Image (spheres, helix red, strand yellow):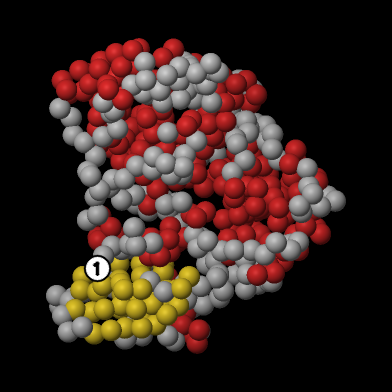
Amino acid sequence: MRTDLFRRADAYARMLIVQPSSVLEPGVPYRSGFHWTERHLQCLWYDEHYRPPCFPLTGGETVRILDPGEWNLEAGPDFLNATLLIQPGDRWLRGDIEVHVHPSDWDAHGHQADPAYERVVAHVTWFSGPPPRSLPAHVLPLALAEPVAAMPGLSLDDIDLKAYPHAALPATPRPCEARFKNDPDRARALLAAAGHYRLQLKAARLRARLAQTGDRHQLFYEEVMAALGFKHNQTPFRLLARLLPVASLGVSRETAYARLLGAARLLPQPEAAADPESQRFIRTLWDLWWRESSAELPDGVMWRLHNLRPQNAPVRRLAAAACLFSGMFTVRHELDRLPATGCAAWHAQALGCLTTRCDWPFWNNRLTLASAPERKATALLGASRAAAIVTNVLLPFAAAEDALPDGALDHLPPEDLSAPMRLTALHLFGRDHNPALYADNGLLQQGLLQIHLDFCLSAKPGCEACGLCAAL
């Protein structure tokens, strides 16, 4: 992958290294076989929805995690005061947890000489292997890879890193505000560097996935499906993409939609329709679905259907997926034929490719499958969601395949401002700043998200000892 595409990423990466009391440890490079970060493993350990229910030990014993511990936002072990139960025998362990990718990372990070790690009772790693030579005898080595592989449908790609550990910040002005409030050029330079860094990580992850799977069309389909699912339904969308591979959608748009809705268990009854046209359409979908007899998502896969904007409803997003990936030639084939023109033209053509394929007359004036037509037209795939797909999927995918036009990171189309973007901007630039600083630039918005993940989530009240301030 070309390193010059993300020319500012190194500047931001250096800022991550100089944090004086940082809880971050050396980053794990994306590579074939493991393309996630240590933070993914921390989130997996912390969240009972992702964490395996038990871990096997040598000798036939098992370990249950009764309490994963408190997420430590300061130096020292990753989690404090965890409770583990070893069976048979009902032996209880209480202490701290350290999380790494490889068992050897315990030695590599020098924990054996740090008294802060004396209360560690379990060393949690992704890969299994011989315990590090300096690991105390009382510390349990627990490997995640095998028990996670035994949990069908679980993917670390679905973990929303921005959601953990829900750190709360006070409403008083932050230290960064004094540094950036009156220096917009410096602010934009920081956000651009963080945006380059974030997109470089995305491209490296996709490059590793491509090396693993060897199926670029399926991988692209899965990534777009996850983006269509947005944050609330990302996991069900990704599971559906694996249950119904892109090769199974090489049919008409309506048939592909019926397959997606049926497999997702989201196909409504015709009687629920508010008008005859909708009723006829739903009956057509049922007729197409009954001919399929395809597999369905397990009952345990739950859809988020409430407290969503109507544009983000899964039934509507699946209609967009059917538009993008049905037929002999999917949107991926069309994108492959785009000329390698200047960055502005490439963005416009990519956006046009997405939105044009999602022009479905039935949906032009409807928000739901069963609702009556609205007076106001609503695009099946709006400009902001299309821009999010371009930035988060198309661009890093092209970079992973060394097919990204020069300058494509400049003037990325903007997305809707999310809550993490707004919160980070508030901390960096103050309450009365002008959002025009970043609102029309997708690269700078990516920078806000990366700073939120690397710094703001781990900030203590008052932002004392913030690594970003020290780096600046």
The x, y position of residue 198, in whole percent, is 57, 47
Q: What residue type is labelled 1?
A: Cys
416 is higher (above) or lower (below) than 152: above
- Relative to 239, 346 lies left or right: right
Q: Residue at x 81, y 59 (%)?
A: 178
- Number of on-image labels: 1
The quadrant the C terminus occupies is: bottom right
Q: Which residue is drawn at 74% across and 46% down?
A: 189
The x, y position of residue 33, in whole percent, is 34, 51
The x, y position of residue 43, in whole percent, is 43, 61
309 is higher (above) or lower (below) than 235: above
227 is higher (above) or lower (below) than 279: below
Instruction: Give the image quarter of residue 453.
Output: bottom right
Residue 350 shows in this picture: no
Q: Residue furthest right?
A: 182
Q: Residue at x 37, y 30 (%)?
A: 315
113 is higher (above) or lower (below) than 331: below
In front of the other: 162 or 100: 162
Residue labelled with disc 1: 54
- Relative to 433, 158 lies left or right: left
- Relative to 358, 439 lies left or right: right
Instruction: Give the image quarter of residue 320.
Output: top left
Residue 423 shows in this picture: yes
In front of the other: 155 or 394: 155
In front of the other: 262 or 33: 262
Q: Residue at x 60, y 36 (%)?
A: 416
Disc 1 crowd rating (10 Å Cα; few below 14, some 14-19, many 20+) is some
* SS type, badge 1: strand
The x, y position of residue 36, in whole percent, is 42, 53
